[in-house]
Amino acid sequence: MKVLVLDCDARVSRGLERTLRVLGHEVLRPTSTAQARAALETEPAVDIILAAQHLDAGETGTGFLRWAEAHVPHARRVLISGTHCPPDFIEQPGLQWFQAKPFGRRELEALLSTPGPSHPRP
């Protein structure tokens, strides 16, 4: 499975990358929302996106995931935050949901095993 991890806290994103690789997944770990958008434009075959709510100055995970929904609609999207689920974030069963931080390997494995949409990728 190909996973994009977007978290501006380098410790968090490196930890997620390390765990995902141990679990056998391919990981893209851009360090900014601009790099994440560019990565998804050149490599749209991402299965799941993990995005933190608090990103670069002026950027939010909810805003980035709205962009991702329009550009890579087949990718499952997970908003991760150590605070709360923002009121403007709309969960979509099997496609988009919220995960509170911190979370461990078991929770990460559960996120990855959540069934996605039943329609095939473009």
Image (cartoon, rainbow, N blue to C red):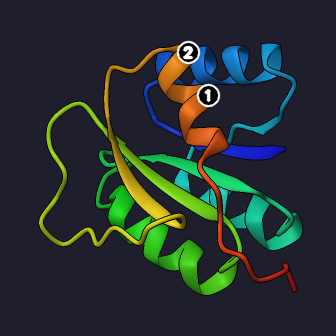
Element type at mark 2: helix
Position of residue 31 relative to residue 37, above or below, is above
Position of residue 30 relative to residue 120, above or below, is above
Horizontal placement of 45 versus 78: left or right? right
Please name the amino acid that badge 2 sits on.
Arg
Q: Nearer the viewer, residue 14 or 97?
A: 97
Image coords of residue 41 (percent x, y)? 79, 73
Residue 17 showing in the rendered view:
yes
Question: Mark 2 near mark 1, Cβ–Cβ under 8 Å?
Answer: yes
Q: Name the quadrant of the N terminus.
A: top right
Image coords of residue 102 (percent x, y)? 33, 20
Q: Residues within 10 Å of mark 2 (few under 14, many from 20)?
A: few
Residue 68 falls in image quadrant: bottom right
* Residue at the image point whose x is 32% and y is 49% from the top: 53
Please name the amino acid that badge 1 sits on.
Glu
* Residue at the image point whose x is 34% and y is 64% from the top: 62
Residue 34 falls in image quadrant: bottom right
Q: Residues within 10 Å of mark 1 (few under 14, many from 20)?
A: few
Position of residue 98 relative to residue 15, above or below, is below
Residue 31 showing in the rendered view:
no
Q: Which residue is label 1 attached to?
A: 109
Horizontal placement of 28 versus 87: left or right? right
* Residue at the image point whose x is 44% and y is 77% from the top: 66
Q: Which residue is label 2 attached to?
A: 105
Horizontal placement of 82 versus 23: left or right? left
